[in-house]
Image (cartoon, rainbow, N blue to C red):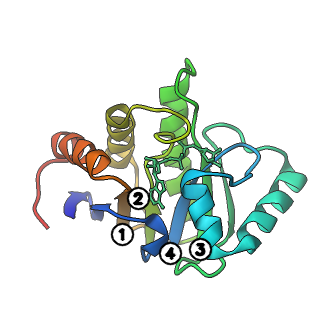
Amino acid sequence: MKVYKVSNVEVVLLQGDITDVEADAIVNAANQYLEHGGGVARAIVRKGGEVIQLESREWVRRYGPVPVGGVAVTSAGNLKARYVIHAVGPVYGDPEGDAKLASAVRNSLAKAEELGLESIALPAISTGVFGYPIRRAASIMAEVLKKYSYRSLRKILVVLYTGEAYKEFESVFDEVLGKRSP
Ligand code: AR6
């Protein structure tokens, strides 16, 4: 675990399963149709319950597919969180991918602020099934976290599943957000 400070917000980098983390909202790495078939999405539905998938389908039925870079919200079922914020990242290779990945992160923060939340947990959106290189995703996320104008948020947990991803994020976050021990 490693803690960084951005204005008056704590950014906590940790390795683990995002479904085990305590935060007001957990961000899911979703697709535009909110069909949670693999990766983090699948883990969230498995642990949180089918209600998350059902509410997701209802969201898409009502508003249509989520744009790439956009977000949708559902309840969190049995998870410790109050909400799941479903963020749709780009597939690697999209020429506008970097901007869309930055939007996905920014819109996740904005949704949490809109809900008046104090804490949010983010996975490495787009770095699994969607193929984004970890280092590139880390630097995009770090830049967004650094520049964001925070209101209600006080704590941001960035949760990496593998040790390898954790190390890459740590080296990028050290560079962009500055070194600080836990
Ligand atoms: N906790 C934290 N991180 C995790 C977990 C977990 N339980 N499981 C995997 N990761 P991915 P994407 C990491 O594929 O690339 C799904 O099918 C994983 O190691 O979940 O945005 C959706 O339904 C990787 O670093 O998301 C979409 O169709 C990161 O989470 C599509 O995949 C993201 O991997 C979205 O692809």
Tell me: is circle 4 under 8 Å from ligand 1. Answer: no
What residue is pinned by disc 4? 24
| Mark 4 and mark 2: Cα distance apart in space | 16 Å
Considering every residue shown, the one lying at the far right of the view is 61
Image quadrant containing the N terminus = bottom left
Contact between marks 1 and 3 (CB within 8 A): the answer is no
| Mark 3 and mark 4: Cα distance apart in space | 16 Å
Three-letter amino acid code at the position of disc 1: Arg
Element type at mark 2: loop
Three-letter amino acid code at the position of disc 3: Lys
| Mark 1 and mark 4: Cα distance apart in space | 11 Å
Q: Earlier in the sequence, mark 1 or mark 3?
A: 3
Query: In front: 136, or 163?
Result: 163
Q: Can residue 152 be seen in this snapshot?
A: no
| Mark 2 and mark 1: Cα distance apart in space | 8 Å
Q: Can residue 87 be seen in this snapshot?
A: yes
Contact between marks 3 and 2 (CB within 8 A): the answer is no
The answer to whether residue 135 is left or right of residue 59 is left
What residue is pinned by disc 1? 154
Near mark 2 (Cα within 10 A), the count class, few <14, some 14-19 or many ≥20, is some
Q: Position of residue 62 (x, y in %)?
A: 89, 55
What residue is pinned by disc 3? 47
Q: Earlier in the sequence, mark 3 or mark 2?
A: 3
Contact between marks 2 and 1 (CB within 8 A): the answer is yes
Contact between marks 3 and 4 (CB within 8 A): the answer is no
Three-letter amino acid code at the position of disc 2: Tyr
What residue is pinned by disc 2? 150
Near mark 4 (Cα within 10 A), the count class, few <14, some 14-19 or many ≥20, is many
